[in-house]
Amino acid sequence: TNLRVTELLPGSQVVVVGLTSASGSKLNGKSGEVLSWHGDRWIVDMNDTEPKERKSFKPENVVIVPERVTKKRKAEEPPPEEKKMKTSDLRDIESSDETVVARCLLRLLREFEIVAQKCICVLATKTSMTVMNELAAHLTDKQADGLLRRQLRPGEKVKGIEELDAQEQAVLLCEKKVRSLANSVRINYCDLYGFLKFGFKEPKFNRKKPVV
């Protein structure tokens, strides 16, 4: 059956089927990991190509491998309840004292990987720095609008800075710019405050559509 957007999640394992072109048919039967949905295609990181390749496929050309999806997502995704700030942290984030906000951000950056990733997206809208821009291009899916679309997977390499530990760089860069980030929280620049308050989710992507 064709796989709609709601049926797959990043990290799902799929097998390629039904390609008929000379180059495409060589991929039939090969497996890969779903990265995202873009336009009308699935973006898939192939497991069985050397060097590693990223391909896009129509829904009818990928078949899910259920038993591998569950194991992978359980290993990589912490339980939802772990991705929450303490009440005291939320209080500090809402403080009118920028120093209090900055100190809280430092704690969150080190405790939650996703917070550093969101902050990189925000910083890159105002800062021209190669490593930061490469990270943001990956995390925002090249939209450069401060919104986190693609979380880093454990050990994932980022194009352009493959020799660096992407998550480690994100934290280090954010620590250096924590004062700027504290100000961004206070004015809710790029929805940073909303992202923190609502369980590390982009408010823009989670707003319910009005009923027509």
Image (cartoon, rainbow, N blue to C red):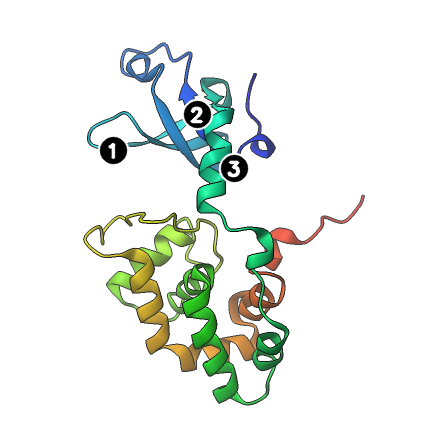
Q: What is the spatial separation of the Cα atoms under label 1 and label 3, in whole angstroms? A: 20 Å
Q: What is the spatial separation of the Cα atoms under label 1 and label 2, in whole angstroms? A: 16 Å
Secondary structure found at label 3: loop
Residues under numbered marks 1 and 2 in contact, where contact means CB atoms less than 8 Å apart: no
Q: Amino acid at mark 2?
A: Val
Q: What is the spatial separation of the Cα atoms under label 2 and label 3, in whole angstroms? A: 11 Å
- For residue 131, what is the image quadrant? bottom left
Question: What numbered label is drawn on residue 52?
Answer: 1
Residue in front for this viewpoint, 63 or 25: 63
Question: What numbered label is drawn on residue 14?
Answer: 2
Whether 13 is drawn above or below 15: the answer is below
Whether 179 is drawn above or below 158: the answer is below
Question: What numbered label is drawn on residue 23?
Answer: none
Q: Position of residue 139 (x, y in %)?
A: 40, 53
Question: What numbered label is drawn on residue 9?
Answer: 3
Q: Position of residue 45 (x, y in %)?
A: 35, 33
Whether 58 is drawn above or below 157: the answer is above
Q: Residue at (48%, 40%) from the top-left corner?
A: 73
Residue 127 appears in the rendering: no
Residue in front for this viewpoint, 68 or 61: 68
Secondary structure found at label 1: loop
